[in-house]
Image (cartoon, grey):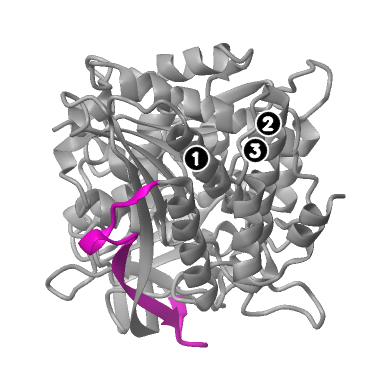
Amino acid sequence: MSGQAGLCRLGKGLLLAVACAAASGAATASDPEQRDTRLEARLRAHIEFLASDLLRGRQPGTAGYDIAAAYVASQMAQAGLAPAGEQGGWYQQVPLRRAYLVNESATMSARNGDQSAAFTFLEHFFTGPDVDAESSAVTAPTVFVGYGIEATELEHNDYEGLDVAGKIAVILSGMPAEFPSEEGAHFASYREKDRAAFAHGAVGVIRVHTPRRDRRVAWARYADRVGAPSMAWIGADGEPYAGAPDLQTNAILHHSAAAMLFHGAQHSLEELIALDEAGAPLPTFPLQAEVSAAQRSRHDALTSANVVGMLRGSDPRLNGEYLVYLAHLDHIGELAHAEEGADRIHNGALDNASGISVMLETARIFAEGPGTGRSILFLAVTAEEKGLVGSEYFALNPTVPVDSLVGAVNLDMPLLLYDFGDVIAFGAEHSSLGPVVGRAAGEMGIELTPDPMPEENIFVRSDHYRFVQRGIPSVFLVTGPKARDGVTDTGPIFQGFLQKHYHKPSDDLSLPIHYGAAVRFTRINHRIGEIIANDPDRPAWVEGDFFGRTYAR
């Protein structure tokens, strides 16, 4: 280990970490091997700082997040970017409301004929804090609304023929088996299901946590969310942005507890779960149960910064247009409850110190290169873990004209744990960006693989989707499940991370991060941007594509 590398590994302060990362890129090497060695050192320096305990999990509204934002701004400046935030600075301050659920305030009970049940928080049901109201209480009849989806484009309407006004919509998690994955992910998202319920007059939604859902997200994982805040950005009217409706209750109920809601109805919950498992259509029908639910939340106000840097394009015909690289800087902070001596910090080494690091070094490569025709924005966003909040704020309040944004490449949680042989670009089939990713990866001997996990609804679960909703063609790029040597079995590594480390304190620097893979992923990202930023034609939606029809300006 060289002296400089040793200092970089041992440094625990902000200034030392910044100096280490800067020093690792201070000289420009001429031969490719030396350039990759320096790039690897810089990527390592970024990840080791951003995932250090000093930052305490980078939750928005904390000193740890603010230090991370200052670090990103300093690295953008050191690489030669220009500030592109508010008032000529690096930051776009996002006004937020933070809500905490008041301890022991969440209650839920049900009455069905001569039966009654008082459900226990976390054992039977879960609800998070409410950013809209400091308290809510409702007692209402219930109706079963299938998956709770209204999708004219997919010829599906669970609300058809039902009277939901003034009632609580009881729905199963998930979506019909025949739905195309990404269009289905849109309609099956929390926000779209809530909108459909609210539009039909429902006063609340109860999502039944089914066995199928439990195989994806174990019920026990909700315990990790106890004590964690919810956040929403605040509009000019002083109220949370109305991207989702304010329902009087919005809860998740375990299927074992939900069964009593279906007593005396046309179908039992057991029958419905069997249909869900088989991928068969679900009936919809009134229920005889009445549910009472209440909660109290504590609110406070804060701001948290998006960080925005820019490289101006050189072509006067194109430099008024922008390609956006984005990655979320935040993670989920510290566990509110942990056993004595247990690790409380969610360091987020791969979620998403890795993505931020790749974005910073992609920016550096562009800054040191010959330039591009179009301009490029590099955007580190806050509060992704709170519902894509920072990216939504930027997409609706961009620091450049929204019509000048031509495309977005999102870097969120690339699993840099092995020498990958393929990449996945969620959203690739919807726009001309897909062939660009395929070309850039192919030039480096890397395949482009279709979404291998359509059931995870990943396309709507990361920041690029807020740009899609503004009509901007976007892709979400991650490393794929194939090994470059064609021999290594990456399945246990890929699935092992998702099962053992995702959103857990163990996503930290003890993981065997493959920095050579980080170098290759960075160079692929640079090549993608190089193609897009020099193409005289803007990225375009595929003709007739659902997202293009729904959102294109």
Q: Which residue is mark 1?
A: 364
Q: Answer left or right for 108 relative to 480.
A: left
Residues tagged 1 and 3 counted as in contact (Cβ below 8 A): no
Question: In the image, residue 263 lies at what x, y percent?
Answer: 47, 59
Q: Can residue 262 be seen?
A: no
Query: Between residues 203 and 527, which one lies in front from this camera angle?
Result: 527
At x 55% / y 73%, what residue is drawn? 64
The three-letter amino acid code for the residue at tag 3 is Leu
Q: Is 360 situated above or below 420?
A: below
Q: Earlier in the sequence, mark 1 or mark 3?
A: 3
Question: In the image, residue 269 lies at what x, y percent?
Answer: 51, 51
The three-letter amino acid code for the residue at tag 1 is Arg
At x 45% / y 77%, what residue is drawn? 108
| Quarter where residue 52 is shown | bottom right
Q: Give the CA separation, mark 2 to mark 1.
A: 13 Å
Other-residue count near label 1 (Cα within 10 Å), few / some / many at <14 / 14–19 / ≥20: many
The three-letter amino acid code for the residue at tag 2 is Asp
| Quarter where residue 198 is shown | bottom left
Q: Which residue is mark 3?
A: 39
Question: In the image, residue 22 lies at what x, y percent?
Answer: 59, 53
Q: Which residue is mark 2?
A: 36
Q: Give the CA separation, mark 1 to mark 3.
A: 10 Å
